[in-house]
Amino acid sequence: MKTSTDTPFIFPRTGKAVKNRSVLAAMTNKQSHPNGTISSTELKWLVRRAKGGFGIITTAAVHVSKEGQGWEGEIGLYSDQHIKKLKNLTSEIRKYNSLSFAQLFHGGQRAPQKITGKKPISASVNKTQYSLDGESNSANKQEIKKIIRDFTNAALRAYKSGFDGIELHGAHGYLLAQFLGIKTNRRSDEYGGSIVERSKIIFEIYKSIKKIVPESFIIGIRISPEISDMGIDLRDTISLVNHLAKLDLDFIHISCWDINAKSKKYINSDLTLTEWITKSIKNLPPIISTGNIWTLNDVNDVLDQGASLYGVGRAAIPYPDFSKLIEEENFNPSKGPFTYDELRNVDVGDVFIDYLRSWKGFIIDKP
Ligand SMILES: Cc1cc2nc3c(=O)[nH]c(=O)nc-3n(C[C@H](O)[C@H](O)[C@H](O)COP(=O)(O)O)c2cc1C
């Protein structure tokens, strides 16, 4: 039987149920407090999407180390002081029968020195606009140990905050992706070399987290299949996913930007990025795939490509009830530009609206 968008989904290992196939993808909105505690505005934005029917609510990227912060107004989980307010978030989300995931992140070479006060670290010495001399440091062994510890402690705090699980942010060019990319990781120790070695840090983070969270806690990872300027290549990604499939991961989230896009490099194939993965690898954990989903047709496309769950980013900003709206025959979503009032009416705060002005064509200001 064909999977329908509102068919419940059960995470096989933990038995945790999702009421439908929809996932609010992580979206940075810069609305939290300078000390990393979540603000009521950011909480409201997320809870409105739970109320709107999303099966899983993912937070914006949350920094696991103070020195890993990527933007102002970002939620933190580097200290126990963050737990109390996040508990309010997760209990509000649970009222709507949605699951909640914290997206755990370290900016690496993209953690600006002007925010953290520290020179960024990465897998290697890489060019960055963010440190005073324009280069990241290459993380030494002690720093790698600290990164692993910080992800582990943040995962435990996410559990204590009431989240159902975490998504490790291995996509979009931040620290974990910097380890995965052959151009950004030129190490000659055990954390560099083949894709197996470049993913060693992720394996160590996963294993360390596994030791301290209960079995029921969901652990997944988000990856980008291709980022050519970092040396993240689709063939390597397939090897990576094959390797990751040996872990007991609860999901792999593929960030495609467009679920119908083909590989930019392997252009002679008709496969979409999601299909490259779902069709080449057996024994995959459940797949979430995200990118340019606006209609029921888009959702059906990505489920047909082999994803178990579909992620929604931009469409969830104007349409918090997206997962219900797509079931309506006459739903014909606008892709923007949206007015200030339209967004304020669906609990998008002023700071987020301001940030969205940098996403071309999304906001239209009053004349
Ligand atoms: C404003 C904004 C902020 C984002 N922040 C994050 C983030 O914190 N972490 C992440 O993994 N992806 C982030 N993304 C990417 C989205 O999760 C999603 O993959 C992307 O927008 C493509 O999906 P869409 O076409 O449904 O928007 C962000 C996207 C937007 C529009």
Image (cartoon, rainbow, N blue to C red):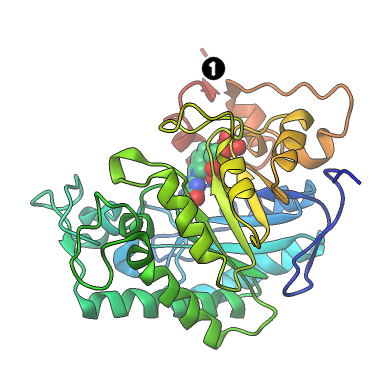
* Position of 294 relative to 244 (above/below): above
Give residue 298's position: percent from left, percent from top: 71, 31
Position of 290 with respect to 302 (left or right) is left
Q: Kindly identify the residue that appears in the image at 20 percent across and 72 percent down.
A: 189
Up-down relation of residue 341 to residue 43 (above or below): above
Q: Nearer the viewer, residue 61 or 282?
A: 282
Cβ of mark 1 under 8 Å from ligand 1: the answer is no
Name the residue that disc number 1 marks. 366
Q: How many marks?
A: 1
Residue 308 seen from this side = yes
**Secondary-structure class at tag 1:** loop
Identify which residue is drawn at 48% across, 66% down: 37
Amino acid type, mark 1: Lys
- Residue at 40% in and 32% down: 265
| Occupied quadrant, residue 348 | top right
Determine which quarter of the picture holds residue 275: top right
Indicate left or right for 1 with 184 as reference.
Answer: right
- Residue at (86, 21) in percent of width and height: 330
Name the spot of residue 42 as percent of width and height, x first: 57, 53
